[in-house]
Image (tube, rainbow, N blue to C red):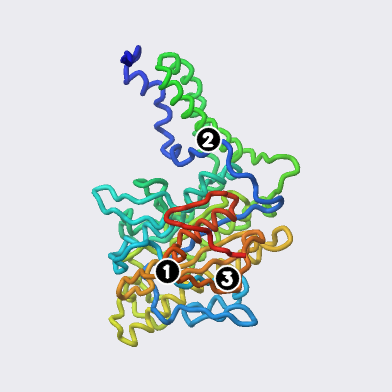
Amino acid sequence: MTTAYNPTMSRRALLRGLGATLTLPWLESLVWAAEGPKAVKAGPPRRFAAVVFANGVVPGRWWAKESAHGLEFSDCLAPLAPHSRDVTFFDNLRLVKNPPYVVPHGTHYANFLSGYPVKKEAVPQLAMTLDQYLARLISRDTVVPALNVGLRFGESATALNGTISWASATTPVMPEVFPARAFDSLFDVTGKLLDRSVLDDVLDQAGSVRRKLSRDDQQKLDEYMASIREVERRIDQATNDQRVPGAWRPTLEKPDMPRPKDGQPQDIPEYMKLMADILVLAFRMDRTRVATLQYNNDGTNGMRCGFIPGVLNEEHHSVSHHSDKPDRIEAHVKTIVYHSRQFAYLLERMKAAPEGDGNLLDNSMALFGTNFISGNTHDTSKLPLLLAGRGGGSVKPGKIIRTDQDDDRAACNLYLSILNRMGVPDKAFGDSTHPIDLG
């Protein structure tokens, strides 16, 4: 018979003793293993970024073919022509195993990086996404576990249409949409110094609290305090930039761009480029090794397309519903070309950053795509998807990978391959059955 535990202190006293932790709402997202995966190689680290635009493409206008000079692209992907030898094109990957493949907005956006069927309950149920999983396992040496940035245009975003990043089944990670705040999260240590004083209070009080807890609760508290000490180590790193003697150091030690102005830029093309610049800067300075960049929200996202020549000033979502009218199809194609041009800009910036024996893109993997193969019909039967970069020599781009058997078509097979190349030796992710050979 188990003896009931009779606490010697009140719940109020316990909360008061640990009250300082309430000022650290980001603690939960920083609970990772004490020992992460070993470095995959000496020299520059590997990085991963997912770059996503919403509302799909036009079937038949998103394709690539192999040639002696690298990949040749359809008009929707034409801006990527200068990077044809740096890209792997995936044909026929699917996100979820079971139909229906025609779904509402949000359903195959929120789960873009997990492949987990969305359960639209009072609290949506999904799964941890690839970026957040990586952040918990490989981010011990960086100040920011994962940089999640995006663009927003005035409307309120929901968890299902506003983010591709989830820290748990019920915890969406909304992207930072203010460039100045994204920049400050990488370089402003003022808040971290304040957090340090809070941690000192927590650590001082924990000893007295621990003596009044049961053995099981002591163990739970010890585990929690271990996570707090890891946060303390990260704060020390952020404020001192201490590295192991002889270890690899980033080639850029100070930001080479000014802090952005407060607020949201009104010039959409410059807004997109600014977020890409911050992502590249974070990678170059090794402030993070995992990032997501969302060019817009899924569905009605407020982004009007009048800044794109030849496109009426309608919302991007409306443009995607072309109803098979030729002139409206061409308008939608122009929006896809524009997003491809923005991704090409990101690749240009990465390739222009020397690192090791190559450049930043050589040591990275950048996933690019959208959730619908047809934005007009919401068809998700396959994902428009490609991967840029060489992953530190572990990826051989310039080719097309086509899959036909359903188990081979899982996007999670690709995500598992990315995990492995980032140094995570897992055998499965989501509904994966095996990694895709990217070599």
In this picture, residue 385 sits left or right of residue 437:
left
Q: Position of residue 396 (x, y in %)?
A: 63, 67
Q: Position of residue 361 (x, y in %)?
A: 62, 63
**Residue position for label 3:** 87
In this picture, residue 337 sits left or right of residue 108:
right
Q: Position of residue 273 (x, y in %)?
A: 51, 65
**Image point 58% across, 64% down: which residue?**
438
Q: Are there few (<14), some (14-19), or many (20+) residues within 10 Å of tag 3?
A: many
Q: Which residue appears farthest toward the right when viewing the image?
A: 246
**Image point 52% across, 49% down: which residue?**
134
> Which amino acid type corresponds to the residue marked 2 in the rendered image?
Val
52 or 438, which lies in front? 438
Label 1 vs label 2, nearer the camera:
1
Q: Position of residue 422 (x, y in %)?
A: 58, 53
Counting residues from the start of the chain, the first of labels 1 and 2 encountered is 2
Which image quadrant: the N terminus? top left
> Which amino acid type corresponds to the residue marked 1 in the rendered image?
Leu
> Which amino acid type corresponds to the residue marked 3 in the rendered image?
Val
Label 1: element kind: loop
Q: Which residue appears farthest toward the bottom when viewing the image?
A: 326
Label 3: element kind: strand
Label 2: element kind: helix
In the depicted structure, whether residue 316 falls above or below residue 437: below
